[in-house]
Image (cartoon, helix red, strand yellow):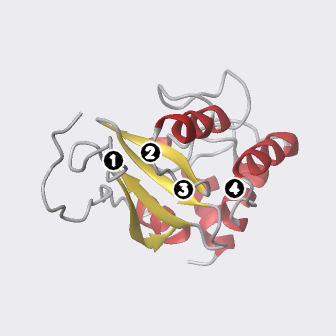
C-alpha cells in the first residue's frame, strides 16, 4: 500500500466521529524536539491529517495532545517517551513507543529512519534490566500499519536470547 492508501484505509477503519481530531502541530514539534529526530513522514501525516492517536492495533496508538483522547493506560506519547529514556538502560534516543499490546509488550518506531523502522519491547521474553527486552523488527511502520489494517495481529517477536537474565 502507498502512504495515501494507508491514510485512506485508516480513515475508513476509524470514521470521523469515531476517532479523535488531528494532533496540533505544536504537539508534533514538541515530540520531535524531545526525540531529536523528525517524525517519520507517514506517522506525521497520520497525526496531522487523520487522528491524534487511536489508530493501529485495537485503535490504541498513543495520543500527543491532552485528554480526553487516551487510548491505553499509558501516558501521552511525549511523556511515555521521556519515561522510557529515563528508566531503560541503553535505550536508543530515536526509538519512540507507539502502542502497547498488553502484558508490557510494546511496538515502537525509530524516528531516525524516514520509513519508521519498527522495534519491539518484550520483557517477558528478554531481560529488561540489561536492555535486551528492546529489539529491532524486520519491517517498517507502513508494513506494520498495513498488517493491522488487514487484521494481522503479529506480536513483536523477540529474537532468541542465550538465556533469560535473572540477575538484579
Tell me the mark number nearer the camera, choosing from 3 and 2.
2
How many angstroms separate mark 1 from mark 3 (CA)?
13 Å
Toward the left, the furthest residue is 163
Locate residue 103, reporting x and y percent. 28, 35
- Left or right, 59 with respect to 150, comes to right
> Is 33 or 63 nearer to us in this picture?
33
Checking the image for residue 46, the label placed there is 4
Residue at (27% x, 59% y) in the render: 158
Q: Quadrant of the C terminus?
A: top left
Locate residue 53, reporting x and y percent. 62, 41
How many angstroms separate mark 4 from mark 3 (CA)?
24 Å
Q: Earlier in the sequence, mark 4 or mark 2?
A: 4
Residue at (42% x, 41% y) in the render: 100
Contact check, label 4 and label 2, Cβ < 8 Å: no
- Left or right, 17 with respect to 58, comes to right
- Left or right, 40 with respect to 57, comes to right
Question: Would you call the spot at circle 1 few (<14 residues within 10 Å), some (14-19), or many (20 or more)?
Answer: some
Q: Earlier in the sequence, mark 4 or mark 1?
A: 4
Contact check, label 1 and label 3, Cβ < 8 Å: no
Contact check, label 1 and label 2, Cβ < 8 Å: yes
Question: Mark 2 — residue?
Answer: 89
Toward the front, the furthest residue is 167
Question: Mark 3 — residue?
Answer: 92
Residue at (12% x, 55% y) in the render: 163
How many angstroms separate mark 3 from mark 2 (CA)?
9 Å
Amino acid at each position: 500500500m502507498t502512504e495515501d492508501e494507508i491514510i485512506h484505509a485508516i480513515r475508513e477503519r476509524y470514521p470521523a466521529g469515531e476517532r479523535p481530531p488531528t494532533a496540533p502541530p505544536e504537539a508534533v514539534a514538541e515530540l520531535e524536539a524531545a526525540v531529536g529526530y523528525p517524525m517519520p513522514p507517514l506517522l506525521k501525516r497520520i497525526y496531522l491529517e487523520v487522528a491524534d492517536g487511536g489508530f493501529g492495533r485495537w485503535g490504541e496508538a498513543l495520543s500527543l495532545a491532552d485528554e480526553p483522547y487516551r487510548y491505553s493506560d499509558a501516558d501521552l506519547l511525549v511523556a511515555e517517551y521521556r519515561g522510557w529514556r529515563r528508566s531503560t538502560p541503553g535505550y536508543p534516543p530515536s526509538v519512540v513507543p507507539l502502542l502497547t499490546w498488553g502484558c508490557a509488550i510494546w511496538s515502537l518506531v525509530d524516528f531516525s529512519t524516514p520509513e519508521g523502522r519498527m522495534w519491539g519491547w518484550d520483557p517477558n521474553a528478554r531481560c529488561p534490566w540489561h536492555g535486551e527486552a528492546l529489539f529491532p523488527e524486520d519491517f517498517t511502520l507502513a508494513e506494520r500499519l498495513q498488517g493491522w489494517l488487514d487484521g494481522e495481529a503479529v506480536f513483536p517477536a523477540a529474537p532468541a536470547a542465550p538465556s533469560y537474565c535473572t540477575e538484579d
